[in-house]
Image: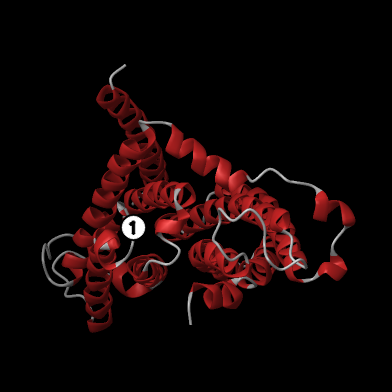
Amino acid sequence: MPLSLAVLLVVLAITAIIAALGCVIDKSAERDERKQGR
Amino acid sequence: MDLTHIHLLLNHIPTIGFVIALGLFLTSLVSKSDDLKRASLVLFVLIGLLSIPTYVSGNSAAEAICAGGPKAPACDDPGLSKALIETHEGVALFAFAAIVLTAAFAWLGLWQFRRMSRPQNWTLTVILLLSLFALSLVVRAANIGGEIRHPEIREAQEIITPNVHFARRIGALVLSLPWSWPSLETLHFIGLSLLIGVILLIDLRMLGVMKNVAFPALHRLLPWAILGFGTNLVSGMLFFVASPEQYAQNVAFVWKLILMMLAGANALYFTVFDEAWALQPGDEAPLSAKAVAVSAIVLWVGVLYFGSMLPFLGNAF
């Protein structure tokens, strides 16, 4: 596998994990705020 | 004064500070005191920030007592044990990772305090488990660190056992994989963009830009900044363990670290203090919030500057 493709795949995979983590935190905040009626 | 002095100055803070923070946290859980809980979470975050210079300055201390640098086959001083120094560095890396992870969840707890009146139970459980695990590692790292200069407390086995040098093994792995360095560089930029993007939005709101936006709406973006900071901390530390000699004596790196500590502490203002949280659409931020915003911009620009100048002011690459 060419180096540039390997780098791209690694970066995309880790960025996807970071994005998923951010979305989980944000969704949980939204859910709790809705529960509190804000 | 150099990084060796910094290491000697800071190396007791993760141990003693962590015991105090954990004691406060446990007391807050038993007494159900929110104020105590908030104080212990702030302490965890501050100790996490201080553990960064504590860890990286250790390499300078090791180089100072083992002349010839990290690649020297043995220390000149027969009273010292090279194996112990390397074991200390390896355990310290584990301890550092556990402390920083605890600090990240402690920050999340503070953020939840602000958004939801109190941290969620799962966050508190994770903080408790992580902090107990981190404490066990910190105590082990501190004990081995003490044995380096105190042969009277060494166990005979620890002097002769060539322990696996964990930190250097991780570093060697980073250097041996051809895709790792460019991937880490790219992730470092992605983390930087997340961090600076969110920080700038908040700071500009404080300075009067986008006044029609209430602060709580921007506050919701803060976890993205912390994820960016975490990405950069992990990628940055992998750079460091792969090639510590490029950073340990690099003046630009020292300044980058100092400014990063101050900027990290500065970010606590928007998580803990009430002034910014009270800002509704159209409200003018108080002078103190504006001062914090200006200092945050200056500090982060400083971090960017010294990060870029690592090869030019210092001896990296």
- Which sits in the foreground, B130 or B152? B152
Q: Position of residue B177 (x, y in %)?
A: 42, 31
Relative to B289, is B272 on the left or the right?
right
Q: How many marks?
A: 1
Q: Position of residue B283 (x, y in %)?
A: 17, 72
Q: Position of residue B262 (x, y in %)?
A: 38, 73
- Which sits in the foreground, B151 or B67? B67
Residue at label 1? B316
Q: Position of residue B204 (x, y in %)?
A: 16, 66
| Residue beneath the point at 25% across and 26% down | A4
| Residue beneath the point at 75% across and 46% down | B162
Amino acid carrying mark 1 in the image: Ala
| Residue beneath the point at 57% across and 47% down | B167
Q: Quadrant of residue B306?
A: bottom left
**Callout 1: helix, strand or loop?**
loop
Chain to which mark 1 belongs: B
Task: Say few, some or many: other residues with alpha carbon within 10 Å of mark 1 (under 14 / 14 to 19 / 20 or more).
Answer: some
Q: Is residue A9 above or below residue B297?
A: above
- Which sits in the foreground, B14 or A20? B14
Q: Quadrant of residue B102?
A: bottom right
Relative to B105, is B232 on the left or the right?
left
Residue B23 visible in the shown view:
yes
